[in-house]
Structure formats: structure tokens, C-alpha cells
């Protein structure tokens, strides 16, 4: 949906610019404003930057026969984002990374994504007591897989965003507590078991 809207937006702006240059229509009501001089170049630069930086931009074009996007995360090295104290610090910009913390300890940390997506699998991780994990999504998606034997406390701040908690809550008061601090701006957060 977002990709279709963005494509239509670019087509409309390009058509308007072409009609203005050829003299068919002037669009003075739109192009006489000061902001137009910044919006069009910034949009074009963002598309160019995205194509240049995104390591696997072809995956957004490909999909299955039904037109759905494939689950196309690049498996990333957990050792690159974990420190010796079991804290994670993962920052993803215009990419799709998958972190599987199988057999790892997790004491807390930060995971942030901007115009990309992150999948973080904690189902086979050892969650330390009172673990605080900060999740930040800016026009991106974070998919968090948590074990069923962990209690969750979710504090979220959403701005034009969608947060979806599909977990089965653990009622065992002896289970480790995982505190999630979520900041979500025009993004999507999905938490599931």
C-alpha cells in the first residue's frame, strides 16, 4: 500500500512538472509556493539515496504469485550488535535485518529502524531479570518474537503508527520480566510468541 501511494505520488509530481515545462498548464497555485522548491528535490534525493544504500532493493520488487511481499530479511550477525554484558544495540537504516538470539543472554538494549525492517527473535534467548528493551521505529517495521514463559510490560508512544501485540500473557509471577519501551512514528510494531 505504501509503495503504491509513493509511486502514484511520484507520477503525479512528475506529470505536473512536465506539463509546466511544456507550457500546457502552469500550476501557479502550487508551484508559486516557497515549499515546492524543497519538496521535489528532497523526494528525488530520498529515492536515489534509498536505491544507492539499500543492499537488496530488488527484493521489494519481487513477490509471490499473489502479489504479497516475501519474508525477505537478511540474517545479521548477533555478535556484531551484542556486547559482553548481554546488551543489544542494533540500528538499521534502509535495510531488512534478522537477529536470532538463539542461546544468547539478553539483559536489555536498543533496537531502532528507519525506513526498513527488523525481525528480532528472542524465543530461544535467556531473558535476564528486569530486562528493558527500547524499540524505535521511524517509517519502518519491527517484528519481535518473545518466549511464552516471559512476562511482558509494554509502554508505547505511537504517532500515526500501528502497534500489534499478539502475545499470550504469562501468568507465572516467577517468570522473567521483559519491559518494552516503544517509540513508533509512522511505523509498525508487531509482538508475538
Image (spheres, rainbow, N blue to C red):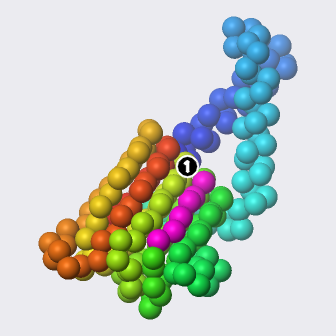
| Place of residue 155 in the rendered image (x, y in percent of width and height, measured from the top left) | 35, 53
The reply to whether residue 25 is visible in this rendering is no
| Place of residue 64 in the rendered image (x, y in percent of width and height, measured from the top left) | 48, 68
Report the residue marked by disc 1. 138
Q: Quadrant of residue 16?
A: top right
Looking at the figure, which quarter contains the C terminus?
Answer: bottom left
Q: Residue at x 30, y 71 (%)?
A: 177
Q: Residues within 10 Å of mark 1 (few under 14, many from 20)?
A: many
Q: Residue at x 41, y 84 (%)?
A: 125
- Position of 180 with respect to 10 (left or right) is left
Q: Quadrant of residue 159?
A: top left
Q: Residue furthest bottom?
A: 103
Q: In the rendered image of this protein, does residue 42 appear above or below residue 102?
A: above
Q: In the rendered image of this protein, does residue 23 appear above or below residue 42?
A: above
Q: Residue furthest left?
A: 171
The magenta segment: 108-114
| SS assignment at label 1 | strand
Q: Residue at x 51, y 55 (%)?
A: 136
Q: Nearer the viewer, residue 1 or 181?
A: 181
Amino acid at each position: 500500500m505504501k509503495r503504491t501511494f509513493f509511486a502514484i505520488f511520484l507520477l503525479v509530481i512528475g506529470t505536473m512538472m512536465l506539463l509546466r515545462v511544456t507550457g500546457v498548464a502552469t500550476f501557479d497555485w502550487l508551484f508559486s509556493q516557497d515549499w515546492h522548491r524543497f519538496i521535489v528535490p528532497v523526494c528525488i534525493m530520498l529515492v536515489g539515496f534509498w536505491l544507492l544504500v539499500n543492499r537488496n532493493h530488488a527484493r521489494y520488487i519481487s513477490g509471490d504469485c499473489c502479489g504479497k511481499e516475501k519474508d525477505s530479511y537478511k540474517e545479521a550477525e548477533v555478535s556484531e550488535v551484542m556486547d559482553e554484558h548481554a546488551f543489544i544495540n542494533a540500528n538499521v537504516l534502509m535495510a531488512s535485518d534478522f537477529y536470532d538470539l538463539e542461546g544468547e543472554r539478553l539483559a536489555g538494549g536498543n533496537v531502532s529502524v528507519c525506513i526498513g525492517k527488523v525481525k528480532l527473535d528472542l524465543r530461544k534467548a535467556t531473558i535476564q531479570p528486569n530486562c528493558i528493551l527500547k524499540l524505535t521505529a521511524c517509517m519502518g517495521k519491527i517484528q519481535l518474537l518473545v518466549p511464552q514463559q516471559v512476562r511482558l510490560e509494554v509502554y508505547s508512544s505511537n504517532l500515526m503508527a500501528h502497534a500489534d501485540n499478539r502475545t499470550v500473557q504469562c501468568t507465572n509471577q516467577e517468570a522473567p520480566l521483559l519491559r518494552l519501551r516503544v517509540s513508533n512514528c509512522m511505523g509498525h510494531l508487531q509482538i508475538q510468541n
